[in-house]
Image (cartoon, rainbow, N blue to C red):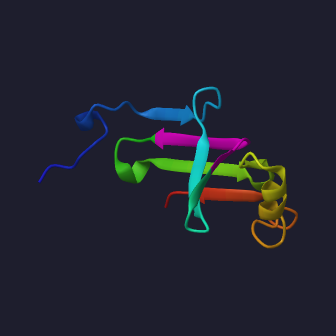
Amino acid sequence: MTATTVETVGLSQGTWNFDAAHSEVGFSVRHAGISKVRGKFTDVDASLTLGATLADSAVTATIQAASFDSGDANRDGHVKGADFFDVETYPTLSFATT
C-alpha cells in the first residue's frame, strides 16, 4: 500500500486563511419541528495548513460567539445569553484538528 500525500491527490502544500469576502460560517437548525432558522457567524478567523501528509496538516478556527446572527435581534440576544452561548463567559468558539 502506498501512502497518500497531498501531491498524489492534486493539492499543493501551504497555508490558506479564511477569506470573509468569499466564505461564511453558516448554520441551519430546525425550530419547533416546523421551520428552519438560518444564520451565520460574522467574525471568524480560520486557517488550513496542508503538509506533505494528512498527519502534517491542520485546520484551526476561532469564532467570536457574539457575532451570531440569525436575522432576528430578539432571538440573537437570547442565543448569546446564559441559556445558550453565554458570550460574556465564553466569548469564543474554537476548533483545532488533532
> Does residue 54 show up magenta in the picture?
no
Q: In this view, does 14 lie to the left or right of 71?
A: left
Q: Quadrant of residue 52?
A: top left
Q: Which of 62 and 35 is in front in this view?
A: 35
In the rendered image, residue 32, in percent from the top left (x then y), is placed at 61, 68
Q: Give the percent coordinates (x, y) of residue 44.
A: 68, 43
Give the image location of residue 15, x and y in percent: 52, 35
Residue displayed at 51% across by 57% down: 97
The quadrant in which the N terminus is found is: bottom left
Q: Nearer the viewer, residue 36 or 83?
A: 36
Per the rendered image, the range of residues in magenta is: 38-49
Please tell me whether residue 61 is drawn above or below residue 77 in the rendered image.
above
Q: Is residue 73 above or below residue 47?
A: below
User: Is 21 left or right of 2, judged from the image as shown?
Assistant: right
- Picture residue at 28% right of the left edge, 34% below the top: 7
Q: Where is residue 22 in the image (x, y as percent from the top left)?
A: 58, 27
Residue at (34% x, 46% y) in the render: 53
**Which secondary structure class fits the magenta region best?**
strand
Looking at the image, which residue sits at the far right?
88
